[in-house]
Image (tube, rainbow, N blue to C red):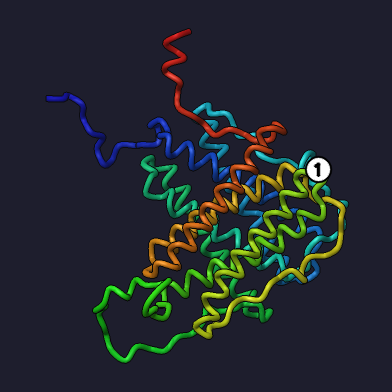
Amino acid sequence: MSNTTKPSNNENMDNERLTSAEMGKLWVIYMGNSMSEIILKYYLHHVDDQDIKAVIQEAHEMSITFQQGIRDIFAKENIPIPSGFNEEDDLNLNAPRLFADEFYLYYLRYTAKAGLSIYSTAIPLMTRKDVSEFVINCDKSTIALFIKLKQTMKKKGLLTKPPYIPVPEKNDYVKKQSYLNGFLGEVRTLHALEIAHLHDNIENNITSKALLIGFSQVAQKKEVRDFFQRGRELTMKHIETCTQQLHKENLPSEPLLDDLVETSKIAPYSDRIMLSHKIDMFSMKIRTYANATSLNGRRDIGAMYAKFIIDVGHYVEDATNIMIKEGWMEQPPKAANRSRLASD
């Protein structure tokens, strides 16, 4: 029988080593908020609407606070602080405005969803008390920001809603295998969850496309500029495909945001931070597409999302290859290479 004793409920667990999950999640939260701090500082430099500015300011301050919380935890554990991004290398505040004020709200909605996804999936994996409390606080703070963001969008007349559908007359059960049809035979109408995720993916992609238009205008390296243009075309195909699914049911879809991008060709950001941003957000698309797939019941919709995931996977891999070639990609903490240690 093992003599190992379990810690009592009253025992302070803050002195335990960080697990791989805690170290990895804190690292990715730090990197994401390091990026947000730089992106949002430029937005604050080019915003006129005071209501919108207040939301950006709160998001900017949150990104700084979250980074400091992780620096404190890592310092206690003698873990190197990630280099992340910085104003000197990654920001040009002298660049002209690239986006209209309204775009900032759509952008924050787009990125806050990504933040919530990271925090909510991290919470069950955290075991140390101080780390759990920190990640829960990140989640709560982001939810509060999201509420304020939606209120501001509503006030500005920018908040769009998912489509309405009739209220069911009674509870019902699926009676035929044709419920799963999508390509052939009798094809049922979309159910509420399928509609919700089609709407959500269009909502994300229209913001992504506008951001890619702006980034492709200002990227300095031709390879990066071409890559953003390819991403813009890929994103538009996904928008069109999801939109067609809604339109087949006579349901509305979101309008594009392309007109909220200005014509400047002077880069406010480094190629490195812009490419890193799209790697992060396209990687998040894989999660949202997979989540939509898990709640889908039609074969054609499932096949559509499967293709989307392959498209995005190839795009992210190609972006990663550019980052590696340029020496721009910071590496997360990793496991020990036991084979190499044994052979040295």
Image point (45%, 22%), residue name: 336
The image quarter containing residue 47 is bottom right
Nearer to the camera, 70 or 276: 276
Nearer to the camera, 207 or 60: 207
The image quarter containing residue 247 is bottom right
Q: Amino acid at mark 1?
A: Lys
Image point (53%, 69%), residue name: 200
Label 1 crowd bin: few (<14), some (14–19), many (20+), radius 10 Å: few
- View extreme (top): residue: 344
SS for dot 1: loop
Read off the residue under disc 1.
221
Position above or below: 207 against 191: above
Nearer to the camera, 321 or 25: 321
Nearer to the camera, 147 or 222: 222
Q: Position of residue 248 (x, y in %)?
A: 52, 81
The image quarter containing residue 31 is top right
Q: Position of residue 183 (x, y in %)?
A: 43, 71
Position above or below: 270 against 171: above
Q: How many marks?
A: 1
Position above or below: 333 against 342: below
Q: Is residue 337 left or right of residue 247?
A: left
Image point (53%, 58%), residue name: 308
Q: Is residue 194 left or right of residue 318?
A: left
